[in-house]
Image (cartoon, rainbow, N blue to C red):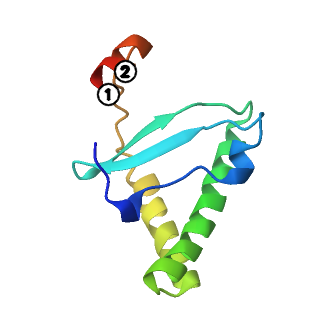
Amino acid sequence: MSQREEFKLTTPDSVASDADAIEVTRMWWSRNEPVMAIMPAFNDPAKYGEMLAQAARHMGHAYAVRKGLDERQAYHRILEGMNAVIKADNLETITEPPVAASSKGASQ
């Protein structure tokens, strides 16, 4: 996987310096669909929903800053997209087998 510089993400300093920080989701857009690695780290699934809601709000802000869109309109478009997937109720979860730690290094 190669990634253009404009799409590279970095770990925030506040997270890197927090020994108790956990990563719960990684997402990519690949072959015209979302692909993700997820970890159900919270005891209450509602906490994950809260995190997604905050991510949607922050992404609306990111669209305003980086793409010049109206923040509120961008946020509502994000919610429209989320609602469309929720209402469709036809999402299939496909899992890939985990890659063994020893084979990761061999491919890099």
Residue 11, horizontal then vertical, whole percent? 59, 49
**Left or right side of 13 for 82:** left
Kindly identify which residue carries mark 2. Answer: 104
- Image quadrant holding the C terminus, namely top left
Please name the residue shown 38% across and 53% down the image: 88
Please name the residue shown 74% across and 51% down the image: 14
How many residues crowd mark 2 within 10 Å: few (<14), some (14–19), many (20+)?
A: few
Mark in front: 1 vs 2: 1
Please name the residue shown 67% across and 38% down the image: 45
SS of the residue under disc 2: helix
Q: Residue furthest left?
A: 31
Residue 102, horizontal then vertical, whole percent? 40, 11
**Left or right side of 95 for 21:** right
**Left or right side of 82 for 49:** right
Number of dots carrying numbers:
2
Mark 2 belongs to which amino acid? Answer: Lys
User: Distance of mark 1 from mark 2, alpha carbons?
Assistant: 7 Å
Residue 99, horizontal then vertical, whole percent? 37, 18
Mark 1 belongs to which amino acid? Answer: Gln
When asked about the image quadrant of residue 101, the answer is top left
Closer-to-camera residue (71/21):
21
How many residues crowd mark 1 within 10 Å: few (<14), some (14–19), many (20+)?
A: few
Label number found at residue 44: none
Query: Disc 1 vs disc 2: Cβ atoms closer than 8 Å?
Result: yes
Q: Is residue 23 above or below residue 9?
A: above
SS of the residue under disc 1: loop
When asked about the image quadrant of residue 95, the answer is top left
- Image quadrant holding the N terminus, namely top left
Please name the residue shown 53% across and 76% down the image: 76
Kindly identify which residue carries mark 1. Answer: 108
Closer-to-camera residue (86/62):
62
